Image (spheres, grey):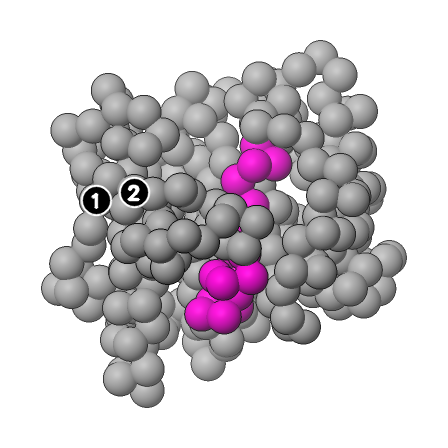
Amino acid sequence: MGHVVVGTAGYSYTDWVGPYYPKGTPPSEFLTRYARDFPLTELNFSYYRMPEPHMLSRLVEKTPDGFRFVVKAHRSLTHDRAANWREDAKRFAEASRALQEPGRLAGLLLQFPYSFHYTRANRRYLAELCEALSTAGGSGGTSSTDARPSLFLEYRNAEWQRESVYAEMRARNLALVMTDMPRLRGLPAPASVVTADRAYLRFHGRNASMWWEGDNRSRYDYLYSRAELEEWVAPIRAIADRVSELIVTFNNHANARAVHNARALIELLNRAE
C-alpha cells in the first residue's frame, strides 16, 4: 500500500488559538507548532498573494526535515485567468523552487471554481497551463531541479467528471483531486478515481446550507462525525494500494475542526492496518 499523508488546508488561523494552538501563541509560531503534529500542509496564502522565494524559504526554516508543503496556485491562474497568465505561471512555478530544492515541495494544487465549465476553450487553457507549470517548476518530492512537479487538479463543477477527462489526465500524469463536499446539484459526487502515480483527497465538509451563500469560513464550517470518516477508511486504503502516495487534507478549518478530523482519520487508518 502506498504512503498515506494526512494534514490540513492551511495552518495560520487565529481562531485555532484555544481549540488547537495554546492560548497566547503568536502567529509567527503557528507553523512550528503545527509541524509537531502533522507532516504536511497546504499553503493557502499563495492563492491570494503571489508567493516569492524568500517567503517559502522562511517556511522551510520553521519546520523539521521531511515536512512538506502543497502550494495552492495563485488566483490569476485558476479563477481570474488573467491575460498575462503565462508570466504568472512562470513566476509561481519558479517561486516553488524554494521548497523543491530542499525536497519540501509535495506538489502544486490547482483549484478551479464552479464557473470553470467543461468547454473547449477551458480544456485548451488547462492543457497549456499544466504544461507551463510543469516545465517551469521544480520537483514534486526529489532533489532534482529537472524533475517536473506533481500537479493536483481540483474541479468544483461536476461537468468535469467524465472518463475522457480522466483519460487525458492519465496520459499527462495529472492527479485528480477527489473531494468530499455537500451533495448538491452541479458539484462533483464523491468518487475514487486515480489518474496519476500519486493521489489527492480533500475534505471540504458537508455544510450544504452555506455552500452557495457562505464565505470562505462559514462555507467550510463543518465537523465530520466519526461515522462519516469511517465511510472513507476502506476507499482510502483501496486508493493507496494503487499509488505511491495519497495526500489527504481537511479544509473544514473553522474553529480548528480540520485538526480534529485529521487526527480522527489518522486514528481510524491506524486501527485499520
Q: Residue tagged by mark 1?
A: 222
Q: Residue 11 location in percent, x, y? A: 47, 50
Instruction: Give me the residue at 63% from left, 64% from top.
Output: 63
Residue carrying label 2: 254
Answer with the quarter of the image where residue 193 lies. bottom left
Residue 252 vs residue 163, the one in the foreground:
252
Location of residue 217 in the rendering, given as x and y in whole percent from the top left corner? 32, 33
- In the displayed structure, 201 sits above or below 232; it is above
Q: State whether residue 82 is above or below residue 226.
A: above
Residue 3 in view in this figure = yes
- Left or right: residue 65 compared with residue 70: right
Residue type indicated by callout 1: Tyr
Residue occupying the far bottom of the picture:
273
Q: Please state, as top left, top right, bottom left or bottom right, where the C terminus lies in the image.
A: bottom left
Label 2 close to label 1 by CB (< 8 Å): yes
Q: Is residue 30 left or right of residue 139?
A: left
Q: Closer to the camera, 194 or 81?
A: 81
Q: Specify the farthest residue to the top.
A: 83
Question: Is 50 in front, or is 36?
Answer: 36
| Quarter of image, res 207 | top left
Q: What stretch is highlighted in magenta?
A: 31-47
Q: What element carries label 1?
A: loop
**Which mark is first along the chain, 1 or 2?**
1
Measured from the top left, where is residue 191 in percent x and y? 32, 52
Crowding at mark 2 (Cα within 10 Å: few <14, some 14-19, many 20+): many
Amino acid type, callout 2: Ala
**Magenta segment includes 32:** yes
Instruction: Say whether residue 124 is magenta.
Output: no
